[in-house]
Image: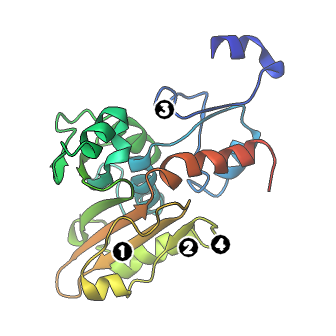
């Protein structure tokens, strides 16, 4: 990057897929749906950092609610997530595909997961969230969930309030869909992580209780799609001025 910077305007545009520059102030964060003007910032940028898979889901759920004042920036947020083993890199892939991996495991239990800084920054949280990632014995696909006690939030919003805010933010989005508040997953009480594999789609859910002041926000995506290479292609097309 020092060589590219020395080239000035003659240097190439760079899209970095690592974690090295995701919170760097002179890099544009490559989540086009972050704010209404983020795609334009990516289009004009010379240096873009591709988001992590877990932060893509968490930030997509939380940022609109923080911007709307429904979730305070200092709220004690907990993020739980499960991913297919392909998100763990070569060693984890070898472990699971060699039949040495467990059926399910928690990891990152030292509270220092590499995705925490970007999640906190782009969700606009002033309090460091607790992030509990996990991996299952399947190749790809992920669920990112955020439980909320609605009676601890300002104004005690309903699930419909949260859902309406997310719906308004992502209205017209090509790749991010806010699923209906009453949907088949709500009725069955289940949601599986692999439905969006091989796509660049991101689905957002709000599950709320009529009986208890509680809600669960869930993002579903392919950790190798919208959580990685799909997002990279989307960003490259913006940076190159393609449709």
Find disc 1 in the rendering and name its residue: 206
Residue at 81% in and 47% down? 241
Find disc 4 in the rendering and name its residue: 172
Q: Nearer the viewer, residue 96 or 154?
A: 96
Residue at 38% in and 86% down? 183
Label 3 CA crowd tier, 10 Å (few <14, some 14–19, many 20+): some
Secondary structure found at label 4: loop
Residue 173 is situated, as x and y percent measured from the top left of the image, at 62, 67
Residue 141 is situated, as x and y percent measured from the top left of the image, at 39, 58
Distance of mark 4 from mark 3, alpha carbons? 28 Å
Secondary structure found at label 1: strand
Mark 3 near mark 2, Cβ–Cβ under 8 Å? Answer: no
Distance of mark 4 from mark 1, alpha carbons? 19 Å
Distance of mark 4 from mark 2, alpha carbons? 9 Å
Residue mark closest to the camera, 1 vs 2: 1
Relative to 40, say whether 171 is above or below. Answer: below
Compared across the picture, whether 95 is left or right of 37 comes to left
Compared across the picture, whether 224 is left or right of 129 comes to right
Secondary structure found at label 2: helix
Q: Which mark is residue 23?
A: 3
Relative to 143, say whether 214 is above or below. Answer: below
Mark 4 or mark 1: whose residue is earlier in sequence = 4
Label 2 CA crowd tier, 10 Å (few <14, some 14–19, many 20+): few
Mark 3 or mark 1: whose residue is earlier in sequence = 3
Residue mark closest to the camera, 4 vs 2: 4
Residue at 48% in and 32% down? 23
């Amino acid at each position: 990057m020092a060589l590219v910077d020395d080239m000035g305007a003659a240097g190439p545009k760079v899209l970095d897929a690592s974690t090295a520059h995701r919170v760097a102030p002179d890099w544009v964060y490559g989540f086009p749906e972050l704010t209404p003007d983020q795609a334009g910032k990516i289009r004009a940028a010379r240096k873009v950092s591709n988001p992590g898979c877990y932060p893509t889901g968490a930030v997509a759920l939380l940022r609109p609610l923080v911007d709307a004042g429904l979730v305070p920036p200092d709220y004690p947020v907990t993020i739980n997530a499960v991913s297919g083993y392909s998100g763990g890199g070569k060693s984890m892939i070898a472990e699971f595909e060699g039949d040495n991996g467990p059926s399910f495991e928690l990891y990152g239990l030292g509270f220092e997961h590499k995705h925490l800084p970007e999640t906190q920054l782009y969700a606009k949280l002033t309090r460091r969230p607790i992030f509990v990632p996990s991996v299952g014995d399947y190749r790809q696909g992920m669920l990112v969930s955020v439980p909320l006690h609605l009676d601890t939030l300002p104004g005690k919003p309903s699930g419909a309030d949260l859902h309406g805010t997310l719906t308004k933010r992502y209205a017209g989005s090509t790749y991010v869909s806010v699923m209906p508040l009453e949907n088949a997953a709500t009725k069955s009480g289940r949601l599986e992580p692999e439905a969006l594999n091989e796509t660049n789609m991101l689905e957002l859910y709000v599950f709320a209780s009529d009986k208890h002041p509680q809600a669960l926000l869930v993002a579903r995506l392919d950790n190798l799609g919208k959580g990685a290479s799909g997002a990279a292609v989307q960003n490259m097309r913006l940076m190159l001025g393609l449709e």
